[in-house]
Amino acid sequence: MAGGLPKRILRETEKLLSEPVPGIDARPDENNARYFHVIVNGPKDTPFESGKFKMELFLPEDYPMTPPKLRFITKIYHPNIDQLGRICLDTLKDKWTPALTIRTVLLTVQGLLSAPNPDDPLANDVAAAWKANETKAIATARQWTRIYAQV
Amino acid sequence: MADKPFTRMESTCLEDEIDFLSAVFFEELQISDVNTPQNEKILFLNLEPSTADDKTKQFVFVKLKVVIPIDYPAVSPIWSTVNSRGLSDEILNNLLAEARQVSETKIGHSMLYEVIEQLKVYLTEQNKPSEACCVCMCEFDAENEYTKTNCFHYLHLACFASYVQIELERIREVEMEDQVAGLKKNGMQLECPVCREIISADSQCMEDIKEIHPDSFFNSQASVPVFKLTKTMRDEQAKRAELFQKQMAAGGIIDLKEEAARFDMDTAWRPPSPEKVEEPEIDQPEEIAKTPVNDAPFIFTEIKDEEKVQPIDPQHEAIKQTTANTKTKQTSPKKSYSRDNYNYYASNDYRYKPRRTYKQERNKNQRNYQSEYRPSYQQDRDSNQYDNNYDNYKPRHREYRGKDRYTDDRYKN
């Protein structure tokens, strides 16, 4: 590896490992300290409850000036997450500031699972279904969680 | 009270004491007009360290709230902080503890001014930012120079310089895209990384970083990675691999290659052939197809219809993917996301590369802008299979890029 790893990334990694966020497990890859394997537990009282969602997180070379790249690997039925697992979150795009960290970003994702926002959709079909019939959409989300996101 | 003889100050009422304070502190002192049920008097005081009025040397600030009960000075006032900058919780607690302690010892006397003076001394001792720099998460020390924004946030010069450069670059890019799209938006402005307060170009912190090379954060931060793989981490990784296999077996893993193929995502975008649009294949896992859910009928069929009307635009996807994956030159999204290397970022070709310089980055953007946007736009116009009428094309902006092709009647069947 030609370059090094900013101290900030080391500090964040240490903190993530020593004081993990409840319900979130993020660990760096064996070969690449900029790549994190993340598992987010579905928050309680949501259709994603009891699900374990695998995510990948990557810190680009300009991090912390540019936001980390974050993607769901496990399928999830959510209006703000599309078929490729990409997430519609302002803090991951133009509202990013270096004061945010991996920890805060993962907490926001957990928040997004608790509070889906069909008015700002990324997956248009899911959002439309969510708006048309919320109970039905929640049942679908629960079913996806049961089928896809089990341990 | 007999053993505590009244002095001239004490015999005067609270009003006089407050008059005296406002004479000393001028506009730093605000007296609340709100009437409380207990008839307390509430003062707000902006406390700054004494630095001989040199504002650039002030790194901390605290706004105090003093609630003065009606029995004052027989009981001590209640001290609390409203707002503070550059001070950690520990120091704030110490500050309030000191205020309480001093006021306890002076019960029965007029104490406000003396306590405030004590606090000012303490604050002057603490006149260095105690929170870590938000960019590098390192503490401030004498070695690395730092600066202060107008909103009292502290950053190392190197960190701030890099932040400003990359942020200005991003703002310029967005404005350029808006210009191409013909959108007039209010100019974006540089914001404080901590509180998003706008940083004006003539502020002191911008002056401070004039001599700093914008890449100095990345150069100074580069250190040899110390990365130890412990047994617990190995176990965790084994667990993850197992979980991944289980979810994969259940069909729960997003297969980017498959999804990309389903929506005909390709860098060389062509209008989709009618068959492809007619048959948006949904790979429906068998369990779902078989499981009848009585109370909540599964809505896969609905998704099918939705996708027929408004499928994800492949070009849009391709562009987003290209920009999302990497800043540097991208081969093709299909190659980068395949089943074989699903953790693309972990693969060798995305390891750390030396940062491009500011100029290289800018030139790259300009080149991309010309080769990606303009010529294809003109080609579309020149070739006869498209409308020659410019107005039929919506500007290629993030929100609009290519979406209209699908709402266009020609591609409906």
Image (tube, rainbow, N blue to C red):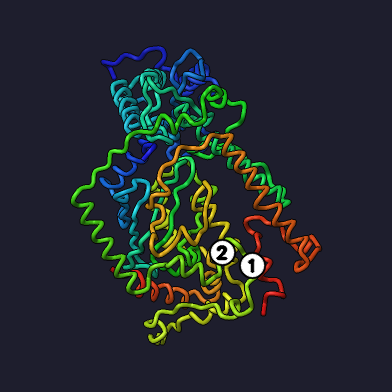
Horizontal and vertical percent position of residue B1: 29, 20
Looking at the image, can residue B213 be seen? yes
Q: Say which element carries label 1.
A: loop
- The residue depicted at 72 percent of the width and 48 percent of the height is B184
User: Disc 1 sits on a residue from what chain?
Assistant: B
From what the image shows, is residue B331 above or below residue B118? below
Residue B267 falls in image quadrant:
bottom right
Closest to the observer: B283 or B295?
A: B283
Does the image show residue A99? Answer: no
Disc 2: which chain? B
Give the image location of residue B296, x and y in percent. 43, 82
Q: Quadrant of residue A11?
A: top left
> Dot 1 surroundings within 10 Å: few (below 14), some, or many (20 or more)?
few
Secondary element type, mark 2: loop
In the image, B325 versus A16, the foreground residue is B325
- Marks 1, 2 in one chain: yes
**Amino acid on which the number 2 mark rests in the picture:** Asp
Residue type pointed to by label 1 = Arg
Residue at coordinates 42% horizontally, 38% vertically from top-left?
B38
As drawn, which residue projects farthest toward the left? B231
Q: Which residue is mark 1?
A: B270
Residue nearest the observer in this picture, B40 or B339: B339
Identify the residue at image location x=54%, y=63%.
A122
**Residue B317 relative to residue B11: left or right:** right
Decide if residue B234 is on the left or right side of residue A68.
left
- Which residue is tagged 2? B266
Residue A30, image x and y in percent? 29, 50
Mark 1–mark 2 contact, CB under 8 Å? yes
How many angstroms separate mark 1 from mark 2 (CA)? 9 Å
Q: Position of residue A110 (x, y in %)?
A: 39, 58
Question: Which one is nearer the viewer's eye here, B90 or A42?
Answer: A42
